[in-house]
Image (tube, rainbow, N blue to C red):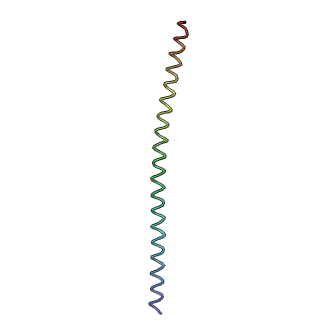
Amino acid sequence: MKAVSIYFANSNVEEMKSEIEAKIYRIIQENFELERILRQAEDAGKKLKKNKEMLIELAIEYASLKGDL
């Protein structure tokens, strides 16, 4: 009878370890995806800032050209 209870206890431990390993794997995958998204957002933020600066420069240039007409 002890052998059976030891087997079930050990079996339960293996199931728990497998579940934990699966959760760890899913979280690691999710973290990689979130890090990729964050890098894209940072790149988009930099591009947006450059675009705004370019718009201001072009607006100033356009205004100065309009005055020359």
The residue nearer to you, when weighing 67 against 13, is: 67
In this rendering, position of residue 11 left or right of residue 63? left
Residue found at x 46% / y 38% = 43
Extreme-bottom residue of the structure = 1
The x and y percentages for residue 57 are 49, 20
Extreme-front residue of the structure = 69
The x and y percentages for residue 35 are 46, 49
The x and y percentages for residue 48 are 50, 32
60 w.r.t. 50: above or below: above
Residue found at x 48% / y 59% = 27
Tell me how many marks there are: 0
Give the position of the C terminus as an image quadrant.
Answer: top right
Residue found at x 55% / y 8% = 67
2 w.r.t. 39: above or below: below
Residue found at x 44% / y 90% = 3
12 w.r.t. 23: above or below: below
